[in-house]
Each structure stands twice: as C-alpha cells, then as structure tokens.
Image: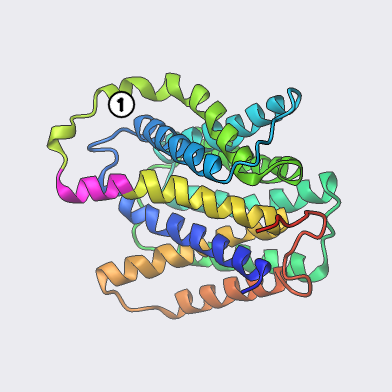
Amino acid sequence: MNKSTRAHAAILLANLIYGANFSIAKVAMPEYIRPSGFILLRVIVALIMFWIFSKMTDKNEKIAAKDHVLLFMLGMFGVAINQLLFFEGLSRTSNINAALIMTSTPIMVMAAASVLHKERISWARGLGIVLGVGGASSLILARKDVSGNATWQGDLMILINAASYAIFIVGSKPLMKKYSPWLVIRWTFFYGLLLVLPFGYQQVSLIEWETFTLPVWLATAYVIIATTFFAYLFNTYGLHHLSASVVSFYIYLQPVFATLISLLITHERVTVVQLIACLLIFSGVYLVNKRSGGVDDNVPLPKE
C-alpha cells in the first residue's frame, strides 16, 4: 500500500469515526456530561496522548517563535471554536439545519485553498463538490429523526463552526510542510486546551461519575479517545499527504456512515433515496480524486 492510498484510508477511517459519533455521543451527552465539559475532557486526554505520540516520533524539532502565533490560531479555530460552537449551535438549531450547513465546509476549503495555496479547481473537482453537496443534502433531508427548533443564532454558530474548520484545514498546511505533523497537532491541542478550559471547567466539576453505567463509560471513552485522538491523528496524516480540498471533501461520507450505522441499529430498510444519495457522494469522491489521486504535490512526504 503506497503513501497516497494509506492517506486516503486514514481520512476514510477518520470520517467513519465521526459518522458513528452522532449515535454514540448521545448515550452520554447531555444527560451525564454537558457539552462544554465533554469538550474539555476530549481536549485534555487528546493532548496527553498526542504529547506521548509526538515524543515517540520526536526528531528534536524546535518551533520558531513566530510560528507559535500560527499554532495558537490553529488551536483557536481547529479546537476551541470548532468544537464549542458545534455543540452550542446544535442545541439552538435542528439536526437537519446543522448537517446541511456543514456541507458548506468543503466549498469553503476549496475556495480558500485556491486563493492561499494556489490549488487548481478542475472541472472534475467542481462537479465532485456539486455531487457531494447534492448527495449529502438528499441523505440528510430523507432522515426521519428530525428534532430541535431552528434559530438563526444556532444556524450562525454552525456556519462559524464550518468556517473555523475550513480555516484550520487550510491554515495547517504551511506548518505541516515545515514541521512534523505530530508536532503541529500537539501544539494545536495545547493552545486549544488553554482556550477551552474556561468554558468547560465548571461542567466537568459537576459530573457525577458514580452514576455512569457501562454503556455510558464506553460511549464516553469512544468520544474522548476515538473521536478526538484517533480521528485527529488520521486526519493529520491524511492532510500531510493530500490536498486540503480532498481531505475536506470526505466530510460528505459522514452522513453515509451515520445512516448505515443507524440502519444497522434500527434494522430499517434501505430506501431508494438513500441508495441514490450514496451513489452521488461516492461519485463525487471519485471525481475529486481523479487524475492526481488528491495528492498535494507541494508537500514533501516524510521518510518512514
């Protein structure tokens, strides 16, 4: 398996983890752990794990003083704003509105990468984005488990969340060309922790750990370890090898995975709309990766 294939597999796994998270996180949140408290726990544990992981692969790299400003910005957009506003926005809008707004992320990434990194927008990639948006939107609108009252404040929070993730994806590329990706993600979470701490400290202190049942413990472990550490680990590996646009496009697979997992749990039958939506998304993935395989030729691949 070559490096490009491994990078695509890593991004695929990251989005599978995120897709499963929609069902699993609800076991523990918000009844047992409030959103901001959950985020603080995720960031603390992930930072410890990334610190250990980066030390195991440490090449004695030193971060230039000026680059700490960029790392602070990545921590703000990629960890603090990204995670805090998603949960806060979700509590103020409907699941459908949130999911539909999130489909704008790859478009934002493609536009920003085109301007800042001179990534070329080919006809195939543009058509792939259109198919991805159409497929994801159809899959989301076909869902029956619609809940929550939509407000413009909630929609705005989700939109800012989507934009912050796009900034993180595009903004991290220059630093990953310069340093080890594991060093970049370690410092990103360090600064993210400083920003998240004031929002989640009180909620963590109110957690009644003794009331946790085994399913709640397992769900909490999944969200903290899999959705945070492993998902960011896989995304970081993929982002180091692939273009920002390609990495962001895999977001369209999340509703596919979420739907498949939901069908396995509820034993519902697959509908024609769901099949067509999945076909559109996978066609979009193929077109976005056509010719170049999504590899960012400007990023030197690390020696392994």
**Residue ID at (62%, 57%):** 238
Q: Where 121 sits versus 181, above or below? A: below
- Tell me the quarter of the picture where residue 28 sits: top left
The percent position of residue 224, horizontal first and vertical second, equals: 37, 43
- The mark tally for this picture is 1
Image quadrant occupied by the N terminus: bottom right
**Residue ID at (76%, 24%):** 66
Image quadrant occupied by the C terminus: bottom right
**Residue ID at (45%, 45%):** 228
Amino acid bearing label 1? Val
**Nearest the eye: 117 or 253:** 117
Residue 143 seen in the current view? yes
Q: Where 180 sits versus 241, above or below? A: above
Q: Is residue 219 magenta?
A: yes
Which element carries disc 1, helix, strand or loop? helix
Q: Is residue 84 magenta?
A: no
Q: Main secondary structure of the magenta part?
A: helix
Q: Which residue is mark 1?
A: 204
- Tell me the quarter of the picture where residue 46 sits: top left
The percent position of residue 245, horizontal first and vertical second, equals: 71, 56
The percent position of residue 172, horizontal first and vertical second, equals: 69, 42
**Nearest the eye: 169 or 280:** 169
Residue 248 seen in the current view? no
**What's the magenta region?**
213-221
